[in-house]
């Protein structure tokens, strides 16, 4: 059985969901420091034919604080209004907007839990069962190197196949993992397009865009547009 580990992001792009789809167990890496300027609390949606950034504030955010020690601001009315105005004419707006709204209005404001909810709710919507974990709840050695932490998590979960995002190619070595009896693969997203009711397709937007413009069957097809190397 396979697993993947990633920091929790809020409604990230399709590739993140493909990684979740590709594995049996997924770990939200929430006991690492928050990445300021990254995509944990922000992403892009399609508005008037262009990519537009949305950001949910995280009071007190700092690169010296763990992700699971921070919480999102409660004021998300402006963000919800922007999403509503941007997609109110999209074919699946009536189904998807309440889903997005339920996540952003969730009572548990902790960054790790709210981001995780934005992932799990999509798979629930698609009728796909996934096993999710938080790294902070796993009993692994946190004093190890980055690679050995992942190997330690594999040991805790009793798994031997680890799949990483493409960015991990410069960080992790297949031979090193193999010596620890762990198979390491990298996921590569294949080229994809779908109708956005615009002249030119704009890729790599938040999963919100994928949900708004595609049926469940189409989304599942998009989730499978990847290969492992």
Image (cartoon, grey):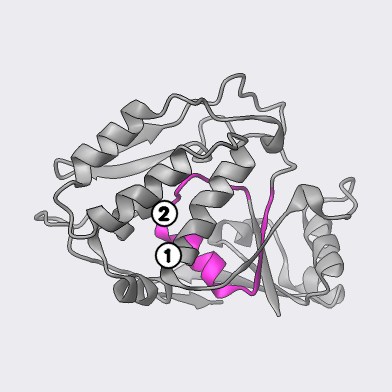
Q: Classify residue 125 by image quadrant.
A: bottom left
Residue 212: image tag: none
Res 124 visible: yes
- The N terminus - image quarter: bottom right
Question: Gap between marks 1 and 2, in whole Å?
Answer: 17 Å
Query: Dot 2, how many residues are within 10 Å of its Cα: few (below 14), some (14-19), or many (20+)?
Result: many
Q: Which residue is mark 2?
A: 13
Q: Residue at x 44, y 24 (%)?
A: 75
Q: Quadrant of residue 201?
A: bottom left
Q: Which residue is situated farthest in the left direction here?
A: 199
**Cβ–Cβ below 8 Å for labels 1 and 2?**
no
Instruction: From the top left corner, tell me how far across and down residue 128 is, in percent.
Output: 50, 73
Count neighbours of disc 1 (C-alpha within 10 A) and say few if under 14, some if 14 to 19, many if 20 or more: few
- Eye-nearest disc, 1 or 2: 1
- Residue 113 vs residue 161: left or right? left
| The residue stretch that appears in magenta | 7-29
Q: Position of residue 107 (x, y in %)?
A: 55, 36
Residue 144 magenta: no
Expressed as whole percent of the image width and height from the top left, the position of residue 130 reads 59, 69
Instruction: Give the farthest residue toward the top.
Output: 60
Q: Nearer the viewer, residue 133 or 199?
A: 133
Q: Residue at x 88, y 55 (%)?
A: 140
Residue wearing tag 1: 125
Residue 39 pos. (x, y %): 49, 40
**Mark 1 vs 2, N-terminal side:** 2
Image-based side of 124 in relation to 215, left or right: right
For the C terminus, the image quarter is: bottom right
Q: Identify which residue, 101 or 155, lies in the foreground.
A: 101
């Amino acid at each position: 059985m396979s697993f993947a580990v990633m920091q929790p992001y809020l409604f990230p792009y399709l590739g993140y969901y493909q990684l979740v789809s590709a594995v049996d167990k997924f770990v939200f890496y929430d006991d690492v420091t928050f990445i300021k300027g990254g995509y944990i609390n922000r992403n892009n949606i399609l508005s008037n034919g262009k990519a537009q950034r949305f950001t949910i504030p995280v009071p007190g955010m700092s690169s010296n604080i763990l992700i699971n020690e921070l919480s999102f601001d409660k004021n998300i009315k402006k963000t919800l209004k922007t999403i509503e105005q941007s997609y109110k004419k999209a074919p699946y707006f009536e189904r998807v907007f309440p889903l997005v709204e339920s996540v952003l209005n969730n009572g548990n404001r902790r960054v790790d839990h709210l981001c995780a909810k934005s992932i799990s709710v999509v798979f629930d919507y698609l009728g796909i069962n996934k096993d999710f974990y938080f790294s902070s709840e796993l009993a692994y050695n946190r004093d190890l190197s980055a690679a050995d932490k992942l190997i330690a998590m594999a040991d805790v979960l009793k798994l031997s196949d680890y799949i990483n995002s493409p960015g991990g190619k410069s960080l992790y070595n297949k031979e090193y993992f193999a010596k620890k009896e762990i198979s390491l693969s990298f996921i590569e997203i294949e080229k994809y397009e779908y109708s956005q009711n615009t002249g030119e397709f704009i890729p790599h937007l938040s999963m919100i865009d994928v949900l708004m413009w595609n049926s469940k069957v189409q989304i599942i097809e998009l989730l499978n547009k990847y290969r492992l190397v």
